Image (cartoon, rainbow, N blue to C red):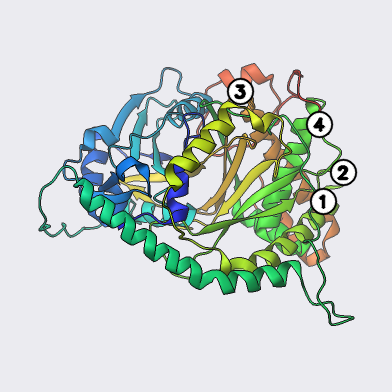
Amino acid sequence: MDHLSGMDASFLHLETPEMPMHVGSLMVMDLPEGHAGDFYEDVKRHVAKRLHLARVFQRKLALMPFELANPVWVDDEDLDIDHHIRHIIVPRPGTREQLERLVGRLHSPLLDRSRPLWGMVVIEGLASGQVAVYSKVHHAAVDGQAGVALAAALLDLTATPRVVKPPRPRRQPHRYQLGVAELANAALGNTSRQAVKLVQTVPTMLRALRSVLLPLDEGTGKRRLTLPKGLKSAPRTPLNVSITNQRSFATRALPLAMLKQMAKASGTSLNDVVLAICAGALRRYLDEYDCKPIKPLVAGVPVSLREQGNQDMNNQVSFMMVSLATDIKDPLARLQAIHASAASGKKVSGQVKGAIPMDFPSFGTPWLMSGLASLYGRSRLADRMPPVANVTISNVPGPQAPFYLAGAKVATYSPVSIPAHGMALNVTVQSYNGAMEFGLTACRRAVPDIGDLGDYMIEAAHELAKLVALAAPAAEAAAVKAAPVAAPAPARPPRARRAAAKPLAPSVVKAEPARRRPAATAS
């Protein structure tokens, strides 16, 4: 038995029907020239040969008696590959917008906890002649970095799949369910070990809190209470509401070289540029609904706690808050303000990194956390409580070489993530093969026109690139201008844009202002 850590299990306990806790990806692929087979069957055979390369594919949950402690992972001895890999044909004409709406629907339902917590859908019928594969896996099993390692188990660097050695036969008793006594003993033993670990980390935690909240004053040499600087309280917006289980999704892409040159020329980081692009798009989106807040928006940014080279299939992540400086009109000044806020957040995260427990005692935790999560969602407290952050923005480094799945080349590789009560929009960004893929996942009721927000991110990026090029020294400006930048397509009415069939490759469009709709008044 493999016990879930306290952090991994929290994604199970906080899950509700309105807030599924799985992450996913959308790969749009080019079939090999002259392909005449059944790609769905090709994918099934390909994945079936590689299930043993990542344990998440073959293990399921075993719940503790009365849910008094965290569940454990056990091997599934009766895995049904047809349940986990399915097939859908998109109705004509098979546009990108249809594909994005389909992914939103596929991302809405919960995963079946009686089976291994993953699934894939092969999608055909696209107007571009490409195929797509949507996949999802529960966040209790992987975080963003582990997800990249998981994909590496399935994908290849050439069109010819690498030879994978078959798994060794496992010697174990064939039992469908573990005994109650065995589970209870395991729960008590694991809780004891978790308690010991927690006690051992208490001194480190206290030292970290002291360094953050009671830093040494350089002038007096004394400690005084100080709260982290550069971050203001988050304002209330239409994004900060209780959510439903229905999802909207959009994906856009930008050249990675362009963003890196912008970061270099402005003296900031790639992550700062991503945050600035999101800030510009959100500022415009909220302004068009007459609800742009006076206070700056705040982003919740996941921070990886993984050591270099660690590819364990679990969660090792914390959060930091970064001001998006949306109260600043000038995009360049906004970028510098974001850079300062992110630097302050990273400093605090670095101080407490070693003190954040990945595991902690779980006795009584499942029913307590599940009950509180359900109460929070059904009571709609998120509609009334001050938001801690307005939006989640995550940046996951990805591979810079083209990947192949069952012989098909992966053209785009977009992340799909988790909106939450109080933060109805999640923007996850992943680099892949020279592109920066923006995956926007939201509650459909809160953000029904998510495609417009995606378009605004592309336009915000080009606006910022032009300003950085003008402000940078001559040599750096030339480097920014040399980066490949696609020209915006002619503007079209929103409905016409959504209905038209177009290639699924990354594109840049310029949207007309969206129609205004009643929105919550921002504070």
- Indicate the secondary structure of the residue bearing disc 2: loop
Q: CA distance from mark 3 to mark 1?
A: 29 Å
Count of numbered circles in the view: 4
| Amino acid on which the number 2 mark rests in the picture | Lys
Neighbourhood count class around disc 3 (C-alpha, 10 Å): few under 14, some 14–19, many 20 upward = some
Mark 3 highlights which residue?
445
Left or right: 22, with 209 as reference point = left
Q: Is residue 189 above or below residue 102?
A: below
**In contact (CB < 8 Å): disc 4 and disc 1:** no
Dot 4 or dot 3: first in sequence order is: 3
**In contact (CB < 8 Å): disc 2 and disc 1:** yes
Q: Nearer the viewer, mark 3 or mark 1?
A: 3
Dot 4 or dot 2: first in sequence order is: 2
Q: CA distance from mark 2 to mark 1?
A: 7 Å
Mark 2 highlights which residue?
329
Dot 4 or dot 1: first in sequence order is: 1
Dot 2 or dot 3: first in sequence order is: 2
Q: CA distance from mark 2 to mark 3?
A: 29 Å
Q: CA distance from mark 4 to mark 2?
A: 18 Å
Seen from the viewer's position, the closer of residues 9 and 274 is 9
Mark 1 highlights which residue?
334
Residue 25 % position (x, y): 45, 42
Q: Nearer the viewer, mark 2 or mark 3?
A: 3
